[in-house]
Amino acid sequence: MNELKIPFFMDGALRIAQGEGYRAGMDACLLAAAIQASGGKKVLELGSGVGTALLCAAWHNKSADFTGVEKQAHLVELAMDNIARNKLNDRVSVKQGDIANLQEIIARDSMDHVFFNPPFQDDDSKGNIPAKGRNTAFIADSSGLSVWIAQGISVLKSRGYMTLIHRAEYVDEILGLLNKTCGDIHVLPILPRTGNNAHRVLVRGRKGSRATATLCAPLVLHENDKQHTSIADAILRGKQALVF
């Protein structure tokens, strides 16, 4: 691949080849910015693709160890290349495997933080589906949202955190699934601009916690002139963590 075509992330600090198909963008950067881990914590991303969110999260958290799990072999290969390109082999790795059988790859109760950006739709009948080669990032297979959450919780340590980004209309389902095992749930609505309804939510829960839930003040992404707000620009460039 021509090196000039490899896009930059974190304001040029990372170079992450995307390959053919779906291109990671704003959602991956927002999710990565929401991960706070230090002191050798073990962090896992489910469905890590070519490693965009994984590498951005590792860049934000320079003393934590990161592992990705990805089902598709060609994406695992690209992710490994991206890890090497950014010289993060010492604390970032990717394993090939199916999330539905996660404990065959990742030991139970072994992770301090699990995060993911799951497929946004359950089937291809709802319209607005990308072309073949991109659709696996959007269309869930047999591993639906309940499986992603349950499997992620199974490898999470007690008092560990789970963080995910999803379409806002899924918030009721997410909360229903997390409430079975997690407390201290924080929901961050993400608005395209002031006056709009949220189109995304970031949700974080803590395994085994009994603390009550928090609905956070929203993050607004754009000014009326379509430019990013100052806080969104700082987050997307890696200049500021997304704390909520």
Image (cartoon, helix red, strand yellow):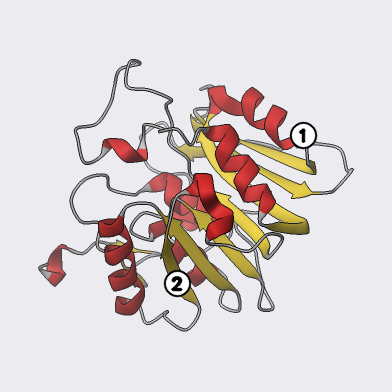
> Residue 217, relative to residue 84: is it above or below?
above
Instruction: From the viewer's side, name the closer residue of 121 and 233.
Output: 121
Kindly identify the residue that appears in the image at 53 percent across and 69 percent down. 66
Q: Looking at the picture, how far across and down is residue 67, in whole percent?
A: 51, 66
Residue 129 percent coordinates (x, y): 28, 26
Residue at image position (43%, 25%) is 122
Which of these two is toward me, 158 or 233? 158
Name the image quarter holding the N terminus: bottom left
Task: Decide which of 121, 196 is in the foreground and name it.
Answer: 121
Q: What is the residue that sits farthest to the left in this orientation?
A: 2
Which numbered disc flags the more N-terminal residue, 2 or 1?
2
x and y percent of residue 18 in the render? 25, 57
Residue type at mark 1?
Asn
Amino acid type of the residue that numbered disc 2 sits on in the rendered structure = Ser
Q: What secondary structure is marked by label 1? A: loop
The answer to whether any part of residue 177 appears in the image is yes
Disc 2 element: strand
- Specify the quadrant of the image occupied by residue 79: bottom left
On the image, numbered disc 2 is attached to which residue? 93
Q: Quadrant of residue 198?
A: top right
